[in-house]
Image: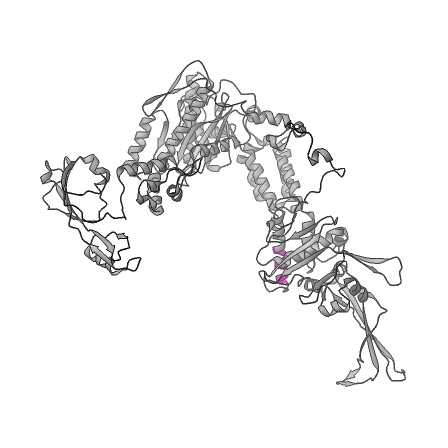
Amino acid sequence: WDLWPDGEFEVDFWAKFENAKQLQVHWSCRVTGGDRRGEDMAGNWEAGKRITRTCQGIITCDVDTCSIILRPQTTAQGISGQLLRRCRCNGRLIHYPCEVKSTLHKWSGGVHYSNLGKHQHARLTHILHVTPREQARFEEIVTAHPKTRALGLVVGVPGIHGPGASVADISPVYLNADRVRKERDKIKKGDGQGGDGFIAEFAAFAETHADFVVFSQLGAVTVICMQTPFMASQLLKTELITSGPVNGLVSDAAHGWWLIRTSLLIITSVYCVSLYCWVPAIFSYSNGATAAHYECHFYALLESIAHQAELRKVEVTDELFAGIADFSEAERAGFCAAFIRFWTVRPNNTRTPTQLAEDFQAIYRGCTQHFRAGVTRVKKISGVIPPGQADAFEFRVLALLTAADSEQFQARAHAVIRDFPKTESWLGWWMRKSHAMMLFASERKMDPEIWDSIPDSTNAEEALHWKLYCAAGRNHGLMEGLHSLFAVAEYYQRLYSGTIGGCLLFARRTHADILFLVGVPIRHGQAEPWKVIAQRIGRTKPGRAPDAANSRRKKNDGRPPDTSAELLGKSKSGKGASRPAPHPSYPWSRNSCWIDSGLDLIFNAVTRDFPDFSSRFDDINPDCSLAPLHKVMQLRHRLPGSTSDVSTMLSVQRDSFRDHLKACRLIRSTNSFESIMVWLPGIARKGDGSSRLAESYFYSKSVSIRTCTGTEDGIAKHAQISSKASKRYVHVLNASECQKFKHSIKQWLRTKILVNKTPEAMECWKVHEGNQCCPGAAHRVSFMVELPIILILEVNDEQDNDWDFPPSLKIPCNNISDTAITYDIVGRGLYSRTKEHYITRYCDPGNSAVFTYDGQKNGGSSI
């Protein structure tokens, strides 16, 4: 059946073939029903249900050179609408009708198909259907490449040697990527059976794998527990494993196995000595993460352990159930409920539920790695732990794990809370009796020998989750996931069978006996090689500790020494210059480049002599407007330069300081763009008496002396000195001064501090109501009387304003020979008018490298 029926013929089709694709055709047909007397289950085709298909022909263009063929719609109104439009070539569309009819009689024996007439027009280029064979081929490609998406299927499925088969080669229908996407989704999601369909499919799965589903409960709490005989056999060890802490049970839930994110795959694993790895002992599908869900899983687990013990005539005791899990309240409560339920139904039980709940505490341990990860998260919160004390906090909290007894544990814990009060709620949670007994050796209820024989983390189970994802993928539908779990269970049984000898093993799978070969190698080399490597070089990654002998070995390629390295040898200067490590700084956020660059320049200046800078703030009022600047510098000075999250801490400090500037009304908003140093004079001037010494770090003081000759005979000569020295925090350099001092910043500064220099001519300052009171010639001399530690210069963005900034400025002091004031250039703030963005360049304290800081690059670090 090629979907192009043509000519006059009659043929009978059996029901199975007709149901596959409903005898679809590529022709555009209008379908009409027959008379009401026909029946689908009639005894002959003449009395069957009749359906008539009438071909609608084709639509073509009146331009001879245009080869476009359109598919007519199935109604006269729809065809009329198509003819009102123009062809792509702007030609007129013409409909060529066709009256060929096909009649289908559906009856109990199948379908009687009658085709009356031959199509006198071309075949349609736009087809809608595929044949069953084409559909099967498409499903085969999609099933074989489940990770390839629609576009990849159309282009060609990825292969080792490039793209492979394309679904577009099957049928032109699959050239449409949207159609391919929809058909692919149908295959991946399955038939979408619900209700009775799902029950039937699950019943068939349970029947096929009769020994795999060991417990199932359907309802509000739905749990399906799965375990093969091999998995169950690994639950009980004949003797304690002494090679390491690999005894007991490790339990955890995988959140990425099922398509529905609220569903979990709960797994409990045990260590297999023969395979040198952890293997799953029981799987459970769970539609939630409540205590009731975990209770079903653990009850099935305990019953399985007890069954194995009875088979081997081993006494069932609490110690058989000892294991480790995370600190999920639901998981712990579910395990405890399962433990109580298990012993309550045992005929020889004499303990009450309260006693059983108390005894449960002796078999349940918590994951130490979860605690360590929590410590790492908390120490990075600068609002809780001061950055300079993060390492001390971590050291003291981890010391709780090794407390000798409960008294020492409590003392250490309360000391941490005393010194880091904001951690009280967090540490208090770990100190709860139900949690502390699972984690801290001094608080444990578990026997010390059992405690030391089982793992201290659930890392083994989490590694198994990753192994499952690599083997079978993620986001499975329910039945797909159950089949995949059986395949995983079978994989471990195959591995186990390949390591033992003495007999042939068989397993049931889909009603067929599968032979598991015995004595087949399952790996190359030694098992668990990382342990040997760690013992030899102190680490598990050989590439991180290269063998010195190999690095010295010369390849024997039949050539004499003829390379520069061999002929010149090693440089006497030792190692070549290496690129300095980046300096963490402020990452850009909300137009912050101006404040970032300003703080960065000041910090790199004060670090040249930080004790001197910090001492000026010893007596400052904490509420003074200048105090937050010292706090920002001090916190950054204490941060370790190599910590990866320093930039994050600095961004918090920067935002806090920007809020302070907004509160002082020195900037328009916390998101506004400002000049690089616009804020410094403001916070300094708003200071009080306690900040005078700190302010002097940034400002220069100048005084002016004015003299006048008075009358012509000089009898009334007079002078004036400024009553208050003027402060300046930022010195602005313009083009006129640049020309006056011949671009020399050294000459500019020297002139500013000189007293004996050519005075500036001016009119006498004695004026009354706008009238000059003195006819004398006046002059003015201005000079600096106090210099700042940090001299801040701002160069106006104008033509011919290019100054010469030497690495150092040495200015001789007045009347003191052999003494000079030296300013070393620390950094420059650079502004881009087109980008409206500031960056900085500065020298490191040793003047060995120049760093560039741009808060929008490198995560806010200077390089």
Q: Determine if the magenta segment contains residue 672.
A: yes
Answer left or right for 668 relative to 827.
left
- Residue 370 drawn above or below residue 702: above
Front-lying residue, 223 or 651: 651
Is residue 557 among what the camera can see? Answer: yes
- Image location of residue 74, percent across then percent down: 21, 52
Front-lying residue, 198 or 238: 198
Q: Quadrant of residue 567?
A: top right
- Image location of residue 850, percent across then percent down: 70, 51
Q: Residue at x 59, y 60 (%)?
A: 835
- Residue 187 drawn above or below residue 82: above
Q: Which residues are magenta?
A: 655-677
Q: Residue at x 70, y 64 (%)?
A: 795
Q: Determine if the magenta segment contains residue 219.
A: no
- Image location of residue 54, percent across then percent down: 16, 49
Colour theme: one colour
Answer left or right for 105 relative to 256.
left
Answer left or right for 111 relative to 523.
left
Front-lying residue, 77 or 723: 77
Dominant SS of magenta comes to: loop
- Image location of residue 149, percent across then percent down: 40, 42
* Residue ranking furthest to the top: 502
Q: Quadrant of the N terminus?
A: top left
